[in-house]
Image (cartoon, helix red, strand yellow):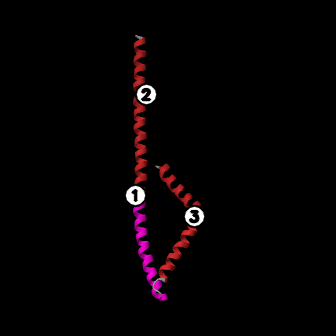
Amino acid sequence: MAFEKLHRSIEELNYNLKAFAHSNTEYYKLQFFKSAMKGAIGLVQGLLLGIFFIFALILVSVALAIVISEAIGTPSSGYFIVGGFYFLLFLLVLIFGKKPIEKLLLVKVSRKFFND
């Protein structure tokens, strides 16, 4: 009698451990899916905003180059000035921008990933 009761308790414990492991696995799958979807949505949103920003920047740059060219009187000078400005901006970001950009991205992504 006592042996059967002990056997049933061990079987019940085994069943409960399997159920716990299964529910724990399902919870972590769901948690991973939630984090992955937040990351994917953020990535798509960031890409779309970046594309629209770049498109607007190109149009404003062309308009600015035309205005500068008309003000100076040489048709191509405005384009060279605007291009030189962007090249200078590129060099500054290349030389001085690695650490601040890395820090900014690390802080933003870690906040989003670990706070939810």
Name the element at disc 1.
helix
Q: Is residue 83 above or below residue 18?
A: below
Q: Which mark is residue 44?
A: 1
Q: Amino acid at mark 1?
A: Val
The residue that appears at 54% across and 71% down in the rendered structure is 89
Q: Disc 1, disc 2: CB below 8 Å?
A: no
**Of the two numbered discs 1 and 2 in the rendering, the one whose residue sits closer to the viewer:** 1
Image location (x, y in percent) of residue 78: 48, 82
Please give the residue where the numbered disc 2 appears in the rendered image. 17
Report, in whole angstroms, how far the alpha carbon at label 1 lies from the one at label 2.
40 Å
Q: Disc 1, disc 3: CB below 8 Å?
A: no
Q: Quadrant of residue 52?
A: bottom left
- Within-10-Å neighbours for mark 2: few <14, some 14–19, many 20+: few
Please give the residue where the numbered disc 3 appears in the rendered image. 97
Q: Which residues are magenta?
A: 44-73
The residue that appears at 55% across and 61% down in the rendered structure is 101
Image location (x, y in percent) of residue 61: 45, 76
**Of the two numbered discs 3 and 2 in the rendering, the one whose residue sits closer to the viewer:** 3
Image location (x, y in percent) of residue 15: 39, 25
Q: Is residue 72 magenta?
A: yes
- Within-10-Å neighbours for mark 1: few <14, some 14–19, many 20+: few
